Image: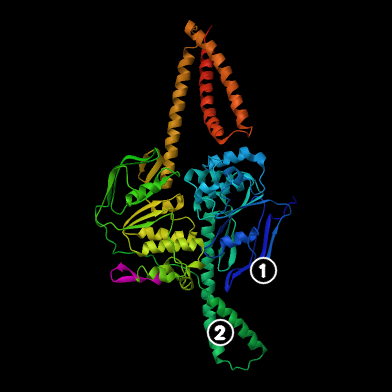
Amino acid sequence: MPQNIPFLDVQNLTKRFGAQILFDNISFSIAEGQKVGLIAQNGTGKSTLLSILTGEEGNDGGSVIYRRDIKTGYLEQSPKYNEDESVLDACFNHHGDPDKVLKAKQILTQLKITDLDQPMGQLSGGQQKRVALANVLINEPDLLILDEPTNHLDLDMIEWLEGYLSHGNKTLLMVTHDRFFLDKVCNIILEMDNQTIYTYRGNYSYYLEKRQERMDNMKAEIQHSKNLYRKELEWMRRMPQARGHKARYREDAFYELEAKARQRIEDRQLRLKASNVYIGSKIFECQYVSKAWDNKVITKDFYYNFARFEKMGIVGNNGTGKSTFIKMLLGLVQPDSGKFDIGETVRFGYFSQEGLKFDDSQKVIDVITDIAEYIDLGGGRHMTASQFLQYFLFTPEEQHNFVYKLSGGQRRKLYLCTVLMKNPNFLILDEPTNDLDIQTLQVLEEYLQDFPGCVIIVSHDRYFMDKVVDHLLVFKGSGIIKDFPGNYTQYREWNMLKSEEENNTEKTAEKKEKKDYHHDAHRRMSYKEKIEYQKLGKDIETLEKKQKQIEEALCSGTLSVEDLTEKSKELPKLKEELDKKETRWLELSEFDN
């Protein structure tokens, strides 16, 4: 391929929906090896832009130019599949290469999709999104275009994907709300704002710093324009209607200045601090609760006493029982034994993964006023429904839109507002960050930090968890739940330190064992040890042959997923056994025969 030509070059791109301009004359390019994150508020056209770039949707002006012969891979936000085709067929239905079956199995295993013969129609939406992600990665395109790749991934999968995308010279453009992911993977941030686009050549942390500088400069420029505008307005009012050429030039400049002076920057100074939320000292006691689904243990004799004003995070891999636990707390699922004893003053507000079904013919503001006209903040203060929506970044114009016009992210945000507008004193939020833009997440973080009640959050968003929670329940699977007093980053640091200590303890024990044998090396072998020495030689030879057979089978690409899984588990055990026998054989070989 020719060098110094960008993989993707976007020139003066414009897109409208009716009278609404999503973006106007935006330009940017992506060169080989660049990892670009795209940031914008919900409803401003992120997914539309990706659809235009991939040819799924048309534009109203400008051009999209790819380097010749370049291969792209596109992960949609909500992929669609034939319900009858198998998982493996779905991975190769977009011009895939059947020779990559082994790679497909490896990637799908990392994304915890194990039954490759299962029909796609039997998979959940989250599982289908993971199959779509695997599909894109398997085909090894030159340019990856990813729309919310971390949605429906658990923490293990997210960290694996971080490593996969960070290594090598991969080129990608992605939309994601996961700020840790942006920080670790991306080296360029594109921000869509006010119908234009801004480029920041660094990761998310760099973007935050430079964006603040841009906003400060823009505020200063607007203020300067306002001062000039006042002077020019006086001149316009004094001047007669019949003006000469110079006067008309100054008049044209006045209207340009007026437009600049009337610019608005959405700068939220307000923090919503309610003081009238009351919750008693008794919250809930989880009394030795057990629950299992089809012999899969969710909790086993689990006890926990929830404290007043506690802000707890629940983390763990998919399928470990996090959502089932909170549904038991809410009374939506009954435990097999034990019970939840809940305080009389507790009023739950529940934000579920499934979301709320809206009447699309309603206006946004009416959805909220049907719940309440205002929220009482205490101390004689209150906030109207319209002010509350504006706090969560619905502009006055958007509030009078019909629900059917909302993007997926805006619908999730409206659902969140319906939960909060009921003024609960105990919030339970199950994956609240999915599909919300970063600006809304920042608003929600502030809201929860100031919230005077109790909070439980189930989330894979590490950045969000660190901002809000001060305590974790870690679901390990098979009914094992660890109680950790701290946020997610503190838990990870503690876990890594614990692993290092365990490794160091093992290494010390191994060194001591070797040292003890070294001191004993000059004695003669006993008859029993000679027999053991001869047997070890034969065992090692047999194990080495078996190891070679397994490794060849794993590389053949002909194994079923069950055999692949079984042999992948068998190989490390075999290597461990071989290592032990070789170590013992070496120890005995030092003795005098």
In this rendering, position of residue 286 left or right of residue 315 = left
Q: Position of residue 197 (x, y in %)?
A: 59, 64
**Would residue 374 appear left or right of 354 to someone viewing this image?**
left
Tell me the residue that label 2 is attached to.
Answer: 232
Residue sitting farthest toward the front: 84
Residue 592 visible:
yes
Q: Main secondary structure of the magenta part?
A: strand
Q: Which residues make up the magenta segment?
A: 374-387
Q: Residue at x 45, y 70 (%)?
A: 362
> What separation in Å lies between label 1 and label 2 (alpha carbons)?
35 Å
Within-10-Å neighbours for mark 2: few <14, some 14–19, many 20+:
some
- Camera sees residue 286: no
* Element class at badge 1: strand
Q: Position of residue 463 (x, y in %)?
A: 46, 52
Vertical arrangement, residue 304 with respect to residue 447, above or below: above
Circle 1 or circle 2, nearest the eye: 1
Crowding at dot 1, Cα within 10 Å, few <14 / some 14-19 / many 20+, comes out as some
Q: Secondary structure at mark 2?
A: helix
Tell me which corner region of the image, top left, top right, bottom left or bottom right, holds residue 432. bottom left
Residue with the most extreme right position: 2
Amino acid type shown at disc 2: Glu
Q: Is residue 363 left or right of residue 575?
A: left
Horizontal and vertical percent for residue 172? Answer: 62, 52
User: Which residue is nearer to you in this view: 156 or 260?
Assistant: 156
Q: Nearer the viewer, residue 372 or 2?
A: 372
Which image quarter: residue 478?
top left
Quadrant for the C terminus in the image: top right
For the residue marked with disc 1, what is the amino acid? Gly
Q: Which residue is mark 1?
A: 61
Please check the rendered image and state whether residue 377 is part of the magenta-colored stretch, yes or no.
yes
Can you give x and y, in whole percent of width and height, for residue 322 in the image? 40, 46
